[in-house]
Amino acid sequence: MSAPPVTGTLYLLPTGLGESALADVLPGQVLATAGRLVHFIAENPKSARAFLKQAGYPRPLTEATITTLDKNTPADAVPGLLEPLLQGFDAGLLSEAGCPAVADPGALLVRAAHRAGIAVKPLVGPSSLLLALMASGLNGQRFAFHGYLPVENAARAQRLRELERRSRQDDATQIFIETPYRNDVMLQALLGSCAPDTLLCVATDLTQPSAQVRTQRIADWKRNACSIDRRPSVFLVYAGK
């Protein structure tokens, strides 16, 4: 009986959030692992090269092979990205910011790796979602993440009311994000759609020197609103007990 083929390991490599020094937010194991790999799959090759340069990649960046996996990658093309791993090479999956495969197209690659019998090893790094939940003071025992909400005004307002009802019924924190240039529009939609006693947390620029986390009732937000335009933010709503 022939031995099963030896495959590489798919390392899930977190990156920084924003402009933080990598040494401040990433364990040495992440930087060391990135430094020994040659094959990478990334949401954005340009930002992946910037990450490797900042991480002190020990060889010329031209020697690193970086293939793209983004929202436009066809599903039937994803298994082909595993070819270096099937040949026995280790590879790293990089998100544009934070943890790969969470609110990130890399999840498709990880699923394909499991189907192919490839070992998957997640490494420790910053997740804006968990950091926001940690700092919010809202229910961390029961929560749900919903990604991006509708862009159209009426549909967005309806979705916000649905999330508020779900939070109340399930006693659960509801978490979502928005494209930064629409942050202020989202904040105004929240103030116009949610009940006065509902708690809203906005966590902005996490891990940055400019980081701000603010949790208060909708009624208090209305009295003392602020602008968060174009600053990466996480929104958390809690209408539970």
Image: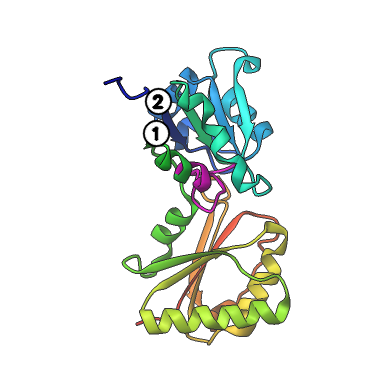
Asked which quadrant contains residue 194, the reply is bottom right
99 magenta-colored:
yes
Three-letter amino acid code of the residue under disc 1: Ile
Q: Is residue 222 visible?
A: no
Looking at the image, the residue that sits furthest to the top is: 59
Q: Position of residue 76 (x, y in %)?
A: 60, 44
Q: Position of residue 11 (x, y in %)?
A: 43, 32
Q: Residue visible at 58% across and 49% down?
A: 210
182 in relation to 26, above or below: below
Asked which quadrant contains residue 168, the reply is bottom left
Three-letter amino acid code of the residue under disc 2: Thr
Q: Earlier in the sequence, mark 1 or mark 2?
A: 2
Quadrant holding the N terminus: top left
Badge 2: residue crowd in 10 Å (few <14, some 14–19, many ≥20) = some
Q: In this image, 140 relative to 227: left or right? A: left
233 magenta-colored:
no
On residue 7, which mark appears? 2
Q: Position of residue 207 (x, y in %)?
A: 51, 46
List the residue tagged with mark 1.
Answer: 118
220 in relation to 50, above or below: below
Q: Are marks 1 and 2 in contact (CB under 8 Å)?
A: yes
The span from disc 1 to disc 2 (Cα, nearest Å) is 6 Å
Badge 1: residue crowd in 10 Å (few <14, some 14–19, many ≥20) = many
Q: Residue visible at 50% across and 47% down?
A: 107
Image: magenta residue range: 96-110
Q: Position of residue 86 (x, y in %)?
A: 46, 26
For mark 1, give the secondary structure: loop
